[in-house]
Amino acid sequence: MLPLHTHDDSKAFTRRWLGRPLARWIVLGLVLITGLWLLAPVNLAFVSPLQDVPSTTTLRPPILDESLLWNQRAAHVRESYLHGYNEYLKYASGHDEVLPLSKGWKDNFNGWGVSMIDSMDTMWIMGLRDEFDNAVRVASQQNFTTVSSTYAPFFETVIRYLGGLLSAHALSGEAILLDRANDLGNRMLPVFDTPSGLPRFSVNTATGQTALGWTGNAVLFSEATSCQVEYKYLAHVTGRSEYYDKVENIMDKMYHANVSDGLFTTRWDAADASPMNNHFSVGASADSGYEYLLKQYLISGKTEPRAKDQYLASTNGIINKLLYISPHRKLLYVTDVASGRPIYDLQHLSCFLPGLFALGVHALDLSPRDKELHTWVAQGLAYTCWLTYADQATGLGPDGVQFDEQSRLWVDALAEWERGGREGGAPPGVSEVPEEHAADKRDYRVSSSVYLLRPETVESLFLMWKTTRDVRWRERGWAIYEALEKHTRVEHGYAIIRNVDQVPAETSDDMPSFFLAETLKYLYLLFAETDIIPLDKWVFNTEAHPLPIFTWSPTEQEQHNAMS
Ligand code: DMJ
């Protein structure tokens, strides 16, 4: 048997080796290679910050198998989904949402189990087949009728339930899910029985009676124009043109409305489809209306040119009228404008917009000028939305911020930069400034400090990553995921927090269904290495439910053209 080396033995062994000329050359060579490797730019980033490596991007040692790392990260998100969903099943099964602190439940969306139906496609995408099969069994028993005097809110029921069922059907092929979607879509049709065809706020799905909501006779732009993707897909798969006619009539009214700059006010009169106020926004009351212009064009296999033309006109209006740049940090943001005056706010809800612009650049054949502009908007806005997270003590983003009134219209700053010969490389609002932890140096104050587990920023990060392949968007998503785990995960699910700039975070007793349906789905898809939902084959509804792109048959197209 060979004797084991002692400490002294090994010293003598080393001396003997280095005494040989060949060994000396080998050692020298290895030292040289290591030295060169350490000086490589990728490694320098860990020693001294390079200018083009923003401090807000998580730096970590390079790893050999990037794919493995990202798939592991996706697996973490799947575990998070299971934690949230299992706690929902344990304490709120059959109800809409779990109350994660008190182990209670609430029925805020008709009591049909929205957390389950809203996230069936998440289960499918994550490969959770047992959970999915159980959900199909439950959904197949659901008759989607409201009890006597209650009304289903049309917009929320469409985006969460109808969108959820259709997507789960499209992904899995389960016929019963289409049957249930068709039944629900049909039960909601009475909402369109208004003089203009703009939908009423809610409907009793047992009796067909409809009701006004908190806005009275006014219909919100987002609520009137965020049912088209779902109903048109339903028309396509069932062959029922009535579904198409009802929702295209609304678009027809909007295409012919007397609006300036391609922008739609937030309130519309159900009597004659005329604008009722002078408030413009891409946030609350408007958001998905703009989103669905592009998405109707894409889901119809680019066979609805009116939707694309309106998208281009509207994005032009957004660029010219709603984009502002902050005075010191030069942050690009999108504000509401009321009676011609900017409000200087940025809502979390508006942070879907950079992702929409990125999708437009990716999917449309834009003119060179539009391509350049839309790319800048996507980058600048996505970065600002991310910074509103990175600036805070928790690393999570507030529901609303109020910018400094010294902000300027972005197009003015842009024109100045172009007149000056495009000095400095990046246009104003597009360079990436560092995060800022001092509240008085941010160029904005937090106006709504809660984080409601909303998806819009991670949705945009997902689309930025998919359309640019710039890994920094992915890394930022990971930083948000880590913050979510640290500050919102509780024993019985995930809980919204009261103040994003306060650590330890104080949680509140709510876990909205869109956390399972959207936030975790977008994070999972951002990290998963496989392109599970390719953007040229699927279109996400505004609740993150992917629906397949289709084309209208020539006869259908003829019928549609006759309508327009
Ligand atoms: C979701 O229900 C949808 O994304 C909707 O379009 C806007 N608001 C919530 C999430 O914040």
Image (cartoon, rainbow, N blue to C red):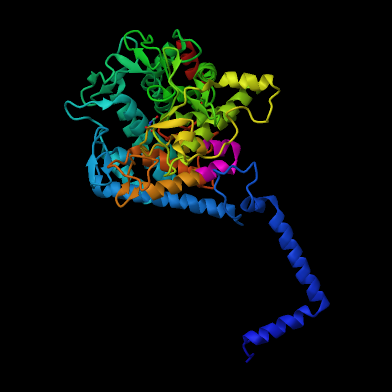
Q: Residue 148 appears at what percent x and percent y?
A: 16, 27
Which quarter of the picture shows residue 375? Answer: top right
Q: Is residue 264 above or below residue 459?
A: above
Read off the magenta span.
Answer: 463-476
> Ligand 1 is located in which of the four quadrants?
top left
Left or right: residue 184 compared with residue 404: left
Which residue is pictured at 58% across the width and 25% down the height?
374
Left or right: residue 142 compared with residue 547: left
Which quarter of the picture shows residue 505? Answer: top left
Q: Residue 1 appears at what percent x and percent y?
A: 62, 92
Left or right: residue 196 compared with residue 145: right
Which is more toward the observer, 36 or 103?
36
Which residue is pictured at 27% across the width and 33% down the height?
109
Residue at the outermost bottom position = 1
Residue at the outermost front position = 440
Magenta stretch: helix, strand or loop mostly:
helix
Q: Is residue 31 above or below residue 335?
A: below
Q: Residue 377 appears at what percent x and percent y?
A: 56, 27
Which quarter of the picture shows residue 519? Answer: top left
475 within the magenta span: yes
Which is more toward the observer, 226 or 458?
458
Which is more toward the observer, 237 or 167?
167
213 within the magenta span: no
